[in-house]
Image (cartoon, coloured by chain):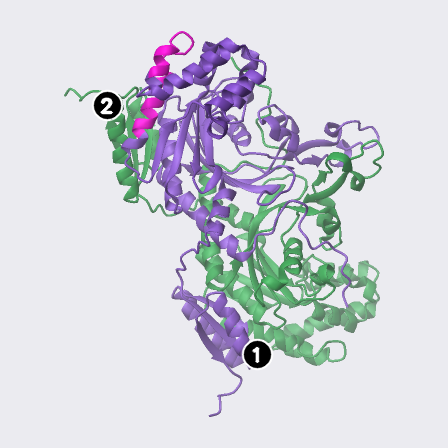
Chain colours: A green, B purple
Amino acid sequence: MAKATLQKKPVNGMKDVLPEEMQLRQWCMQIIRENYKSYGFTQIETPCVESIGNLSSKQGGENEKLIFKILKRGEKLNIAQAQTENDLADSGLRYDLTLPLSRYYANHMSELPNPFKALQMGNVWRADRPQKGRFRQFMQCDIDILGEPGNLAEIELILATTSTLKKLGFSGFRVRINERRLLRAMAAYAGFSEDAFDTVYIILDKMDKIGMDGVSAELSESGFAPEAVEKCIGLFEGMQQADEPLKYLEEILKDTLEDGVCENLIQIRDAVLAAGQEGFEIVFDPTLVRGMGYYTGTIFEIEMPEFGSSVAGGGRYDRMVGRFTGNDIPACGFSIGFERIITILLDRGFRIPEEKTKVAFLLEKNLPTEKLAGAVKEAQRRRDAGEQVLMVRMNKNKKFQKQQLEAEGYHEFVEFYREALKN
Amino acid sequence: MAKATLQKKPVNGMKDVLPEEMQLRQWCMQIIRENYKSYGFTQIETPCVESIGNLSSKQGGENEKLIFKILKRGEKLNIAQAQTENDLADSGLRYDLTLPLSRYYANHMSELPNPFKALQMGNVWRADRPQKGRFRQFMQCDIDILGEPGNLAEIELILATTSTLKKLGFSGFRVRINERRLLRAMAAYAGFSEDAFDTVYIILDKMDKIGMDGVSAELSESGFAPEAVEKCIGLFEGMQQADEPLKYLEEILKDTLEDGVCENLIQIRDAVLAAGQEGFEIVFDPTLVRGMGYYTGTIFEIEMPEFGSSVAGGGRYDRMVGRFTGNDIPACGFSIGFERIITILLDRGFRIPEEKTKVAFLLEKNLPTEKLAGAVKEAQRRRDAGEQVLMVRMNKNKKFQKQQLEAEGYHEFVEFYREALKN
C-alpha cells in the first residue's frame, strides 16, 4: 500500500484547469489568435521570469508589491549575510505582459517590423489575496503596436478588440475613450495643483457611481479650494450641455491643452464607427482614468453591462521602451481580461461547438492479439478520416460506462469481444 | 530624453521567442492538439508553481537539484532566522509535467473520466547550465493515460505520438520499447546484487555507443564479478541469435520474471504495427533504460536518425498517484521533446503553409477623417472576408517599405492618399 505524503491541492490561490473549462479556454484562444492575425498582429512570447530590477522599476505601480520573487541559486545565494529580499532574489515572475514586451522590443528592435504589431497570450502572477474568481496565476491576452505615433494604432487596437469580443459571442458593450493629456489640462484649468492631480483623477473616476454631486462633495471634503471644485464641476456641466463635448473642451482648454488632442479623439471615434462593426458603442468619457502610471496619451476601456467592471483596457505608453534603450518609442496596447471573459462564458453555460464525430471503442479485457490488432486498425482508419476515437477497456457495468461516455460527448459505441457473441 | 536604466536582455538562460519561431511553435502546437484530440485526449492545465514539498519528493531525480524556488511572502518570510533555502521558500517552478499531473489527478479523480486521457502543453523550468539550444524555460508536451492497467495505454500512447510526429513532417524514426521489470530480471539472472542494478543499467544503456565489448569491459572495470558479467553478456548474445528475443528471454528468465511481461511487450509491438501507420519501426531494445526513477513497467523512446538523442520518451509509472492519495493508480505517459522538434524544423528551414491572403494598406500621413474612415471600412470588409489586412502609415521611402512588407509575406498593396493622385 502506498503512503500518501504529498500535497494534492494546488498551491494557495492558483488553480487546476479541468477539461471542460480548458476546452473553452482553448476555443477562445484560437478565436482571439485567428482574429488578431487578420488585423496583422503576430504572436510572440517572453520568458515568465524577469529580472528583479525590471520588475521593481516603478512601471508596474501597485503590482510591484505583489511580485513572486525567485531565490538566487548557487554561490549567489548567501543566506547568512542576507538582510533584505533583494539580497535573496535576483528575478521574479512577471506581473503583466507590457513590461516584458517593452524589454523584448528594446532587445530585438532591429529584427522586428516597424511598426510592430504584437500579440501575447500568457500567464502572469500576482500575490493578491485569493478570492472568488481571482487567482494568483492568470492569463493575459494583450495586443500592442510599437513604433506608430499616430492614431492608426488606437483605431486598429480598438477595432481588433471589438471584433474579437464579437466573435466570442459578446455584444452590447461600450468602448470608453479618454486622454491623459486632457485629464491634466482639465485639472490644470480648474486650478488644482499638479501634485494633487492623481487624487483628483481618482475622485473623477467615481463619477458613474456617485454622480456629479458626489464628486463635488468628495472634492470639497478632500480639502480642495472651493473655486477649483466649482470650476471643475463647471467643466463637466458644460460638457453635458454641449453637442460635441470634445469641441467644447478644445475651445475652453485652449490655453492648457496641446493642439490636436481633442481632434485626435474625435478621429479615433469616427474611424472606429466607420468600420461598420455593429453591436457596440464608442464614447468619449472624460472621467475615465485607468490605474497604471505609465500611460501618456489615449486611454480606453470596454465595459459590458452584464459584468460590473471592464473586460478590456489599454492605452498609449510612449515612454516605456525608452527606459530600456534611452530612446522613447511610441507604443499603445489593449488587453482583454481573458479570465473575466471565461468567467462570463462559464456563467452563461456556454458550450463550444463540437466539430468532430466522437466514437468510443469498448474492448473486452484480454483480447487476443489479432482481435486487438483489428480494433487498433479500425480506430486508425476512423481517426485518419477525421473522427475522434476513444479506445477503452470495457467495464463490467457496460451500461454505466456508456452513460459516462455519453456525458463526455461519445454517442457512438463499437464493441470488441474475445469471442463472437452468442445470440 | 529617456534614461536607459533597465535590463533589455532576458534573464540568464531564458529566451524571447521571435515572430517567425513563434508561428512555427503555434503551428506545431495546433497539430499536436488536434491529433491527440482525435485519440481522445483532453487538454488540461496545472499551475506553473508547485509546493516545495511536492517538488522535493524524490520523484524528479536529478531535476530536483535544478528547481527555481520562490520566496515566501509576508509574515512567513523571516530572513533573520532563516538557515536553509527551505526556510525561505515554500514553492517553486515545476520541473516537469508528470508530477503536477499526478497531483491534479489525485485532487480531481472523482470529477474525471476513467480512464483519464490527458494532454498537457506547458512550460517547465530547470536551472541547468545554459548551453546552445538548451534553455532554463522550455515547453513540454505530454500525453498520459491514468487508470488503465493494461497495454491499451501503451498502444494508444505510442500510436498517438507516432501519428503526431508524422503530421509534423517526420518519418524514418524508430520506437524502442523495454520494460523495467525485464531489466531487473536480467540483472538478477546475471547475479548482480540489487543495489548495483542502477549502475548496471547505466552501463547497458551505452550499448549502442560502445558495443557489446565496450559494455563487457566497463562492467568488469566497475568491479563486478566475472561470472555475472559473462552471464549478462551471454544473455545479450543469446538475444542476438534468437528469432524473437522476447520469447528467448521469457524462457531463460522464467524464474526471475513475472508471467506475461514479454508477451505484453510483443502484443504492444504487434498492435502498434497493426494500425498500419507507415514510415517508422518499433523494436524491442533490452538496453533502453531511461533516467527517471519513477518508472515501474514499460518504457519507450523515439529516436530520429537526424537528431542524435531521443525526440520523445515515456513509460509506465504506476506508483506516483499513490504518493498523493495512498492508493496506487496505473499511469502511463509519453512526452514529445517539443523544443527538439522545433530545433529540427528550424534547422531544416521548414516554412509553415500560409493560409490567408495578406494585404497591406499604406495610409499617407494625416489623412482627413473621411479618407481614413474609407480605408478602415475597406479593411474591415476584407478582414470579414477572411483576409489578413495590415494597416500602416506610408513611409517616405515607400519602395523600401514595400520590400520589408514583402519579406513579411504581404504581396498586395493598397495605397490611400490625402488627395487624388495627379497624373
Chain to which the residue tagged by mark 1 belongs: B
Q: Nearer the viewer, residue A119 or A254?
A: A119
Q: Main secondary structure of the magenta part?
A: helix
Residue A381 in sight here: yes
Callouts 1 and 2 in the same chain: no
Residue that mark 2 sits on: A417
Residue A293 position within the rendered picture, expressed as x and y whole percent measured from the top left = 72, 59
Q: CA distance from mark 1 to mark 2?
A: 73 Å
Q: Nearer the viewer, residue A176 or B394?
A: B394
Residue under the point 71% across and 73% down: A235
Magenta-drawn stretch contains B262: yes
Q: Nearer the viewer, residue A189 or B343?
A: B343
Residue type (three-letter) at the residue carrying disc 1 = Asn
Would residue B411 be found to the left or right of residue A271 on screen?
A: left
Q: What span is colored magenta in the figure?
A: B248-271
Disc ID at residue B367: none
Q: Residue furthest left?
A: A423
- Quadrant in the rendering for residue A78: top right
Residue under the point 53% across and 34% down: B97
Q: Nearer the viewer, residue A212 or A397?
A: A397
Disc ID at residue B397: 1
As helix, strand or loop, the secondary structure at mark 2 comes to: loop
As helix, strand or loop, the secondary structure at mark 1 comes to: loop
